[in-house]
Image: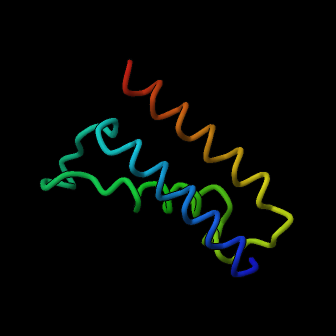
Amino acid sequence: MSPDLKKEIWQEMRSLGDRLKEILEPDPRHPRGRNPYAHVAGCVRDHFGCSYADLPDDKAGELREFLQDLEQEERGNHRA
């Protein structure tokens, strides 16, 4: 991914992490609380099979859609 696009995407991922701070459910594997930024990065890695930075530029739109879907999914899980 190009450096400028990488910065944009990382900002979007951090922003999503900020919004998920209070939403992520507690997990016994994380006794001091969950790291929402690591959660977002891990979900991206699991979905795409690599880090966001290793994706080609033409996957940026798909990645942005995935981040929107991830937020909706986490908010839905929180309400359940």
The location of residue 65, given as percent across then percent down, is: 71, 44
- In the rendered view, tell whether residue 5 sits above or below residue 32: below
Residue situated furthest top in the rendering: 80
Is the image coloured rainbow, by chain, by secondary structure, or in one colour? rainbow
Q: Is residue 9 above or below residue 61?
A: below
- In the image, taking residue 46 as reference, residue 39 lies left or right, namely left
Q: Where does the C terminus fall, quadrant-wise?
A: top left
Position of 44 with respect to 57 (left or right) is: left
Front residue (pair 36, 5): 5
Measured along the vertical axis of the image, is residue 5 above or below residue 16? below
Q: Please name the residue shown 62% across and 40% down the image.
A: 68
Q: In the rendering, at what x and y percent does residue 78 appear?
A: 37, 26
- Quadrant containing the N terminus in the rendered view: bottom right
Badge count = 0
Say left or right for 41 vs 36.
Answer: right
| Residue that appears at 80% across and 73% down | 56
Instruction: Give the residue at x 13% y 53%.
Output: 31
x and y percentages locating residue 79 in the rendered image:
38, 19
Q: Quadrant of residue 19?
A: top left
- The structure residue drawn at horizontal position 23% and vertical position 41%, both measured from the top left corner, is 26
Instruction: Give the farthest residue toward the right.
Output: 58
Q: Does 4 sit left or right of 27 as displayed? A: right
Judged from this view, the residue extending furthest toward the bottom is 3
